[in-house]
Amino acid sequence: MIGSLGLLAGGCQGPLSTLDPGGPQAQSVFVFFVAMTLVATLAMVLVIALFAMGLRRGKRTEPASDPDGEARTRTERRWTLWLGIAFPMSVLTTLLVATLWVGEGQFVRDDTLPTWRATASQWGWRFAPIGADGVVGAASDRLVIPAGEPVIVEMTSTDVIHSFWVPRLAGKMDAVPGKLNRHLIQADQPGTYLGVCAEYCGVGHDQMRFVVVATGGTP
Ligand SMILES: [Cu+2]
């Protein structure tokens, strides 16, 4: 049992694991994922328990005169109201609000943050810093950012739609030809973080990986 848990926990690690967040954006997605999993598990257990109760109760035949019939009907209505309508509506409303909250946290709010241009093309990425004057610097095949502070990645594509995804740092963002989509990422610790293209873009899609190197402090 303990060995199985160890194996499971080991499977959560790795350079492309969303279960091992390395920055606040990825952390909020991870917390949301865990909360959703717990709530979904509780809801499933509840539904199975109710289903089992229903099976155990069996089919009821109404007697010609049933003095408790009215009370039973009231109870059934109450169950339908609370578990059939109020419970799922509360869960769905909470889910909607939490989704908007987490999604909002991934957006760029501060235009003055250090910015890099990510240009995708079949099948690779190029990254270039953008100066305060808006001039795009020399491009490289790896994204080098400072650790411990949020940065903006402004992405585009030269051909088809790609998607920028560094699972340990943030959610995904599409790189679309003719558009500049902006994404907020942050690496709390210095180190190397693996990224992939998360939108199928042709036969070389699976090789479209890149690295984000967070510098500063002690790696
Ligand atoms: Cu791709």
Image: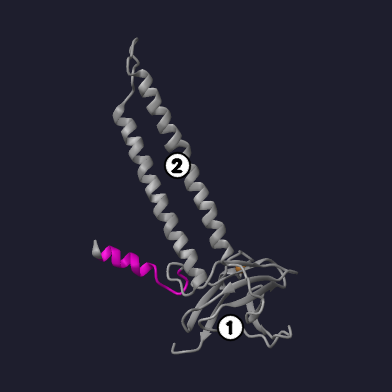
The percent coordinates of residue 19 (x first, y second) are: 43, 67
Circle 2 crowding by C-alpha within 10 Å: few under 14, some 14–19, many from 20: some
Looking at the image, tell me whether mark 1 or mark 2 is earlier in sequence order. 2
The answer to which quarter of the image holds residue 134 is bottom right
The percent coordinates of residue 169 (x first, y second) are: 51, 73
Depth check, front residue: 25 or 178: 25
Up the image or down, 53 lies above or below 133; here it is above
Query: Callout 1, which amino acid?
Result: Arg
The residue range painted magenta reads 3-17
Ligand 1 falls in quadrant:
bottom right
Instruction: Examine the residues drawn in magenta and state their main secondary structure.
Output: helix
Depth check, front residue: 92 or 54: 92
Q: For the residue labelled by badge 2, is the local secondary structure a helix, a strand or a loop? A: helix
Residue 142 numbered tag: 1
Up the image or down, 144 lies above or below 100; here it is below
Up the image or down, 137 lies above or below 32; here it is below
Q: Is residue 203 visible?
A: no
The answer to which quarter of the image holds residue 121 is bottom right
Label 2 beta carbon within 8 A of ligand 1? no
Q: For the residue labelled by badge 1, is the local secondary structure a helix, a strand or a loop? A: loop
Residue at x 47%, y 47% (from the top left corner): 91
Q: Is residue 94 visible?
A: yes
The percent coordinates of residue 133 (x first, y second) are: 74, 86
Disc 2: which residue: 87
Residue at the far left in the pictured view = 1
Residue at x 52%, y 56% (from the top left corner): 98
Q: Closer to us: mark 1 or mark 2?
A: 2
Is residue 78 a member of the stretch shown in magenta? no
- Count up the numbered dots: 2
Residue at x 64%, y 80% (from the top left corner): 116
Query: Callout 2, which amino acid?
Result: Phe
Depth check, front residue: 201 or 215: 215
